[in-house]
Amino acid sequence: MRKIEKETVNFIVNGRKYQPTIEPWVTLAEVLRDYLDLTGTKVSCGVGECASCTVLVDGNPTLSCSTLAITVRDKNILTIEGLAKDGLHPIQKAFVDCGAIQCGFCTPGMILTTKALLNENPHPTREEVKRFLAGNLCRCTGYVKIIDAVMAAAEAMSKGGK
Amino acid sequence: MGQEFAFVGKRLAQADTPIKATGAARYAVDIKLPGMLVGKVLRSPYPHARIKRIDKSKAEKLPGVEAVITLEDTPKILYASSFRDLPMAPSGSLQRADEYILADKARYVGDAVAAVAAVNERVAEEALQAIKVEYEELPFVTHPRDAIKPGAPKLHDYAENNIAARVSYPLAEGDVEKGFQESDVIAEESFSVTKQSSGHMETQTTIGSVDPTGKVTCYSPCQLSFPLRRGLAKIFDLPEGMINVVNPFVGGSFGARLSVYNEPIAVALAMKTHSPVKIEYSMEENFTCVHTRTGDEYTVKMGFKKDGTLHAMQIKILTWAGAYIGRAQLAGGIMLFWGMGHYRCPNKAGECEVVYCNTTPSAAMRGYGNPEVMWGVEQVMDMAAEKLGMDPLELRRKNIKKVGEPSNLRLPIESTYLEDCIKAGAESIGWQEKWGRKKEGLKRRGVGVATMMHCSGAYPLLIEHSGAIVKFNEDGSINLIVNPGSPGTHIWGTLSQIAVEELGIYPEDAHIVTGETDKTLFDLGSHASRSTFVTGSAVLMAAREARGELLEWAGRMLGVSPDELEVKDRRVYIKADPDKGLSVSEVVRSAMWDMKGEAMNIAGKSSFAPTPTSVSPPTAAYFAEVEVDTETGEVKVLKLITAVDCGTAINPMTVEGQCEGGIQQGIGYALTEDFFVNKETGVLESDNFTTYKMPGSLDMPETEIIIINKPDPKGPFGAKGVAEPGLVGIAPAIANAIYDAVGVRITDLPITPEKVLKALKEKQS
């Protein structure tokens, strides 16, 4: 029987270095949730259809449930826990203030996808927001207040937040 | 409109949302306990099979496997997954218990046959593969229509022709046959509705654990914690006090989580291994094994006088129960109550047959039969309006029940502003300009309406009982101890707003303590849109008692009688001399730390168990504007307006959120969500987000939520329920709009382009 080699792999998550010892087949979501105890990243469908598991890898929205962890070694990974050191990031605050969070399970993925959108396009229209979030599934809110929140966050960030 | 509130009625951000925004909220799926094992369930690949032999020896020997269990290793106690096998209804009616922890016979693809607990997921998977089950395949049937035929394969020994229950409408009135004969116009049609999946984003996950004294802790997303505790007590023959049901944050419920699923398996594995065991469903298991909205085929017949007065009504239903009865018995029967509930009618009758077949069981989903039956009733109303030559709005206005008339459960209606809903929604959508116009072109637009009445609690069908504790802290804040967890309905915020409004303090002064049966008073649970109305009333009662104790102690401190005092803005003061007062904090600190031997807590506790002599039903009118492409059959919903009467909106942002979410689920129900079982294999093929299509951001129309906001006399601060109403009338409003656009009526959900094209072709020929 072939022996599976575990490997100690470097990950940079939220600016911090980790070196978990992992099997080559684990997903990024498993590394974050099970090895690093960063359970803010949620797995819903587990097959890349709902974007709940979205994290940013070098700024790009990435489906962590469908990404082999070793393929993102040494890259800069941002999870929901890393968005704000103290208090709430303007995007998080906007989601709270606009009533955009109900059960909250899709929220981390929505917020990080929003961050990627606003990094690329700081002043999106509602239509552009809808398109960018088209892959993020939500069953509670009907998306209306989520879009409100993204627009509010865009305004708050252009006035001086980051 | 009367009293101005400090916090009730304000668009306040919810206290439980920052923790969700930062990823710090722990759902069952995130909880890790020391020594926790991974549990997995072996499921039947056959839709109907005898289980002849299970050989678990190989699985048990795998390194890392701590337990492998079959039915023989569990208490062989039959229970109902709805908990309705134990008393819960004032009428005394009970539901048959028809499930074991692990199946005695496989009755659907996905039925639980064995379970393992192992050190990690991969070993657990390997263990499942290593279990050898000898099945004897049996003939199967995947639709109730086929299951009810003589000679059909029998799922349960007791159920002849697979009929689990027969319900005759208990509130039948008059003489329905005579009524139809006396009617000038009759409208009649047959409809079918699909088994909608709740589609909640957090898959079903539970953790069972047992401590050395034998005390069980069950982490569960179940919406009915105390009934679950009682159910587990029955199954495991334990006293209730030896079970703690913990409700973590929950990633959506929508009614699916009223029932019990993997909890007994997790507890059984925990008992066997003496370790905590977490069972997390995959998304496929979530679709296949978590119970769906009940499917039905039914006919609606309505007879009217020529002036539009409804004179006779009859509904006959075939309800799709699936492999076990789930909640289908009540969900089917209740359609008769909803269906013949919000219009006045002197002659009414109906029946429902609840039928087993080899598929995922049916239970509750948001609206619990009301969306299912309004699909048909609101279309037949439009059919009748056409025959009568009346505007559909006028026909509804003529027949909707008014205040004081008996509700769908024959209790007088305390408040209804359905007329206001119809008026406001019609104006906003532009009904006069758009409805009934001649339509031309390849893409045609139309508008449609639907109305409904729902409930603020399940009484008198089920008992009502909620309790709350309000206790003050020295800083003037309170701990609000209530049972509802956080499934995402913002109930913590609503209950806090009610408490602080009564106590004269601020929303940030309320610290919620919740979610454990060990810590909270009894609460029946979160269902039937009851939490605001019933638990809210319990909170109000407890807050009033606490307020009384606060003013009593303050009165002693200020040398006046408590009725001379008022409390507002965190301050207790003399009404006649407002400058004389004390902060709430000073009063509590003085009472709690009193040095003269008279110390007391400032607190209140309540048990609210109404047997109301009236009901306060929320009502709503839904207006849809659609565009139908006559070449492709595609239906685009351009605009959806929900005008809702839920009494006082404790938090308008919450009400809007419920209604907007309801629109997403309603549009899915109407257009894209379909429960699809392969007839050759019995396998559920709609078991992921690609095959079971739920609306995304681009599928949503322009929405508008109009809150009528007029108070109900009985609700806390005038509030009624709102969680379910958001969904009820969306699908028929869309169907009626399609008829307005292109003159065809779709009677089977979902409305697919194929069905629209077929109907258009048939209309032309």
Image (cartoon, coloured by chain):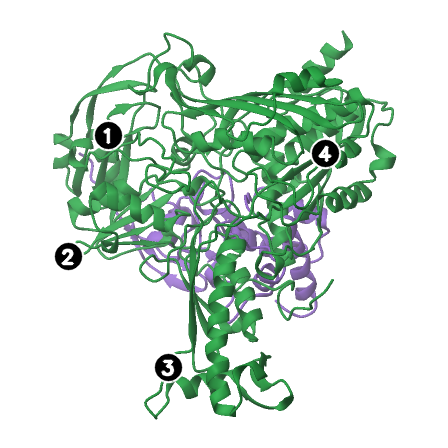
The residue at 26%/44% (across/down) is B266
Question: Which of the 4 image quarters holds residue B391?
Answer: top right
Q: Are marks 4 and 2 in contact (CB under 8 Å)?
A: no
| Label located before the other in sequence (2 or 1) | 1
Left or right: B596 with respect to B718? Answer: left
Q: Amino acid at mark 4?
A: Asn
Q: Amino acid at mark 3?
A: Met
The residue at 42%/14% (across/down) is B148
Q: Which residue is mark 1?
A: B129
**What is the chain letter for disc 2?**
B
Q: Nearer the viewer, mark 1 or mark 4?
A: 4
Q: Quadrant of the C terminus of chain B?
A: top right
Q: Nearer the viewer, mark 1 or mark 3?
A: 3
Q: Quadrant of the N terminus of chain B?
A: bottom right
Position in image of residue B563 (x %, y %): 56, 81
Looking at the rendered structure, the secondary structure element under dot 3 is: loop
Q: Is the same chain shared between marks 4 and 3?
A: yes
Q: Which residue is mark 4?
A: B399
Tell me which chain appears green.
B
Q: Are marks 1 and 4 in contact (CB under 8 Å)?
A: no
| Apparent colour of chain A | purple
Q: Nearer the viewer, mark 2 or mark 1?
A: 2
| Label located before the other in sequence (1 or 3) | 1
Q: Are marks 2 and 1 in contact (CB under 8 Å)?
A: no
Question: Which of the 4 image quarters holds residue B452?
Answer: top right
Q: Amino acid at mark 2?
A: Pro
